[in-house]
Amino acid sequence: MRAPEKMEPLKRCGWCTPDPVYLRYHDEEWGVPVYEDSRLFEMLVLEGAQAGLSWLTILRKREAYRRAFHGFDLRQVALFEDGEVERLLRAPGIVRNRLKIQAAVQNARAALEIQEREGSLSAFLWGFVGGRPIQNNWASWAQIPDRTPHSMAMARELRSMGFRFVGPVICYSFMQAVGMVNDHELSCFRYAQIRDLAEGSQKALI
């Protein structure tokens, strides 16, 4: 009887640890183009909350954030007053940092202004990459920059509109997360999948 062939382990990006939370995020979400305003706002809040912490820490708190911020509904979060901020400072499961919580509320208000002016937060944010994902070609994680001219432009514009915790490094991490750039390593099994997914989504828009 022929012995079964051994399955080769999937090759993933160098930043992805064996932690199940990280594996699921890398394999199913990181780099997938996101266009819904509420999901884009969610990632802006989470990326801002991550400042000074590990991304794994934030991913483990994600469901608590969704509960605390009403599913990242922009209109509800924009209405938060001081009492809601105090409630969130006691909420279990999220980063209880006053400046980060206040930033999320302020960012929701600024995002609503963008919606009124541009039609959607998505149209505005995706405009920084010309409306289509940038396909990079990195051989290793060490080659990937922590900021780019696109993220610096995004950070500068968002800050001018009153957004907080949106520096160029945070903005680039956000762009990677929501698929504005494909920064999977060339050897990663998700690189080609994300590239093809992005191309397919663009064809659907034509």
Image (cartoon, grey):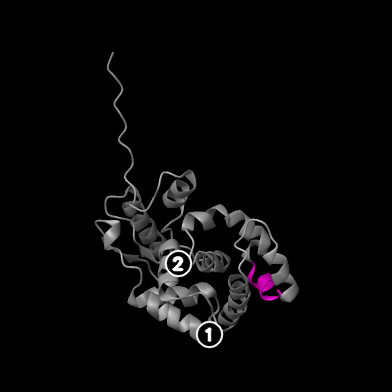
Lower sequence index among marks 2 and 1: 1
**Can you see residue 45?**
yes
Disc number for residue 161: 1
Q: Residue at x 29, y 19 (%)?
A: 3
**Would you call the spot at circle 1 few (<14 residues within 10 Å), some (14-19), or many (20 or more)?**
some
* Residue found farthest to the bottom: 160
- The amino acid type, in three-letter code, at marker 1 is Met
Is-magenta flag for residue 79?
yes
Above or below: residue 67 compared with residue 48:
above
**Measured from the top left, where is residue 4 in percent x and y?**
31, 22
Tell how many labels: 2
- The amino acid type, in three-letter code, at marker 2 is Phe
* Residue found farthest to the right: 83
SS at circle 1: loop
Image quarter of the C terminus: bottom left
* Distance of label 2 from label 1 (alpha carbons): 18 Å
* Residue found farthest to the top: 1
**Which one is in front, 124 or 119?**
124
Disc number for residue 20: none
Q: Can you tell which quarter of the image residue 75 is in?
A: bottom right
SS at circle 2: helix
The residue that disc 2 covers is 174
Above or below: residue 40 compared with residue 109:
above
**Left or right relative to 1: residue 97:** right
**Would you call the spot at circle 2 few (<14 residues within 10 Å), some (14-19), or many (20 or more)?**
many
Q: Which residues are magenta?
A: 73-80
Q: Can you tell which quarter of the image residue 79 is in?
A: bottom right
